[in-house]
Amino acid sequence: MTTLVVAFAVLCAQAMADETVSPLPPSAYTVRAACPAPAPGHAACLALELVPRTAAARAHTHPIGMSEAASSVPSAAPSPAAGQLGLRPQDLHSAYSLPSDASSTQTIALVDAYNDPNAEADLRTYDSEFSLPECTRANGCFEQVNQEGHASPLPFPQTTGELAAQRDLCEEESEEACVPVEEAEGWSVEISLDIETAHATCQNCHIALVEASSTEYGDFGAAENSAASLGANEISNSWGGPECVEGYGCVGEDGAFNHPGVVIAASAGDDGYLNWLAEPRSPYANFPADLPQVVAVGGTRLNTLATNGEWTGESVWNDGGESAGHKDGFGAGGGGCSTLFTAQPWQQAVSDWAQVGCGSHRAVADISADADPYSGVAVYDSSESCYKPYREGGKAHVLADWCTIGGTSLASPLVAATFALAGGAHGVKYPAKTLYENAAQSSSSLHDVAQGSNGECASPFDEETGLPGCMAAQDAKASCSSQLICLAGTGYDGPTGLGTPDGITAFEPPAGTSEESSSGTGGPTPPTPAPVTLNKTRSLTTPTATSTATTTGAAGARTVQLTGFALTLNALIALNKSHPKIAALAFTFTLNLAARVHTALEERVGRHGHRHWKSIGHSLTIAASFGRNTRHLGGAGVLSPGAYRLTLTPAGGPSRSLTFKIG
């Protein structure tokens, strides 16, 4: 509320122009990131709010103009339904030639962090404003669950009162108390953007909001698995962080995002090619968009729509510059070559793959959609984070709870919902394959975005025109040696992938094609193992699993083999803290057959030279699936300084153990 009061006071002191121009230049606006930058082992939401910075921008007109009819409607206050606060549902449908309903029952899951107590009520208000079908718990359209898939208890804040109480502690200058308030308020905006965009795009789809307890990757992984177990046909992830962080290590493969037959979309990021706009800079593609099993979604800017709302063109979203960043500029669509994962066969099969510049590595993105806040959507969120200043009758006013939002957080649910309109994965193991097959057979099935670059611009952002100080070719030459990984061109390119939706044909498997069970998984290209340095005084080497037993299966039978046993990056970071929680012990492993796996945690104890391993009572039996699995130990206890051994024993197979130290 303090931010709202300050903004209101500033507005009162400024004069309002008698007339406004539509569309206004980008220089009339700036942006505000909904969520703070992520710490190592954490992710951030990727919603960006468009904020007016001039008197004219505080008028009643959405920046891209929408259409002459919408932009010129006189109003006492800006009208979302008239298109004066961002793209409306009908604008998304007309721009991308999309139907409103799916032909079959589809459930879209939105994976987010923290709890939004007003999520359902805000969606109801949004639906009412735009005359959409109501989507509520009562009519079975909407559900809201925690990361375990249960309706309660939901994460912090469970009520608006709990958030208000925490905010009071924050205002008493308790810095630690401010962190959850800032994050929860930011994720509330993200949640509203996600569920409203998904429902606006597919208006008869079921909406499942799955809320992780925190922004740690382990919690997001749990939420992702729960989303799949709820029966979601499509899962959208409007969040991310660099796949590797200097001094900490890499996220690596995560089985939580490998659910064959489910469309899993992930935002490519808002900080440009290899996160060049991020502070501090971390030159890597974003996780989980870097995973070969997901549909990585890049960002574009829509041109001003035609009078009838039709698409008139798109370019790569890149409003960054030397003096820009997220404070004075808009950001840029993310992307780049993964350093960990190989590209799927169908990605390497694009005709211009040799010019992309990734070799055999995964390239981000696969597809793209509108993401620039300047061409963003109208969002209703009652968390006090959204407001629109305006003047009427010479007096300053504020339209509460509405704002204009962009970022690849917008693009991901839009693409996931477009897959829903097309009927989901249709049995295809990894549905990104469908996009590549259709693009190869018919380039007109998508809008091919061939203008722009998401590379770094060394010249200042032009405050007069609101445009980057560099030409796209300059950005690309400096950033990626003019290769297609950061420069748009005809056909496939990194910033926009195969293009943007033009109807739903590209999202439906081509006639006469069949899914092969031997399709590649695009697994990781393992880097050379190296110590993971956590701070100046302590380091933790990534533990290596060692076999402690050897068994031979019966004649003709296959022996269960457990490989790839390692602690996750999130666990490595947690173990560097004083007295880490046992529940922070997250680990990954791969099975050649589905099997039950017994876990055992032991501590090295003893004295006077007589030491042995002692169980500390946190065993667990896991029903593990074929392929990659990610799990964590349960329990509310903590681990004291010392040496520990974690052992996994699959039924009918040899044990694997790894050791680690704390302190």
Image: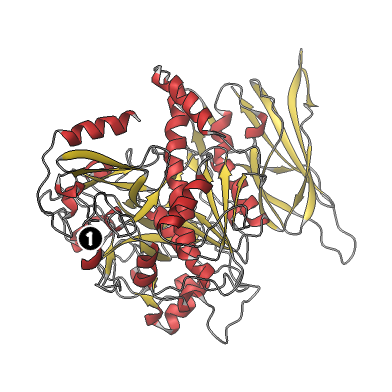
Q: How many marks?
A: 1
- Give the residue at x 51% y 33%: 160
Name the one closer to the observer, 572 or 318: 318
Image side of residue 57 versus residue 348, left or right: left
Image side of residue 328 versus residue 40, left or right: left
Q: Please state the horizontal and vertical placement of residue 34, each as a whole percent of the image.
A: 38, 42
Name the one closer to the observer, 615 or 230: 230
Quadrant showing the C terminus:
top right
Dot 1 corresponds to which residue? 73
Judged from this view, the residue extending furthest toward the top is 608
The answer to which quarter of the image holds residue 626 is bottom right
Judged from this view, the residue extending furthest toward the right is 554
Instruction: Please determine whether, in this image, residue 614 is positioned above or below residue 341.
Output: above
Judged from this view, the residue extending furthest toward the bottom is 512
Instruction: Please determine whether, in this image, residue 114 is positioned above or below residue 226.
Output: above
**Tag 1: amino acid:** Val
Q: Please state the horizontal and vertical placement of residue 429, each as a whole percent of the image.
A: 61, 69
- Give the residue at x 66% y 24%: 639
Q: Please state the horizontal and vertical placement of residue 551, each as a whole percent of the image.
A: 84, 51
- Give the residue at x 9% y 50%: 18
Name the one closer to the observer, 532 or 320: 320
Name the one closer to the observer, 418 or 161: 161
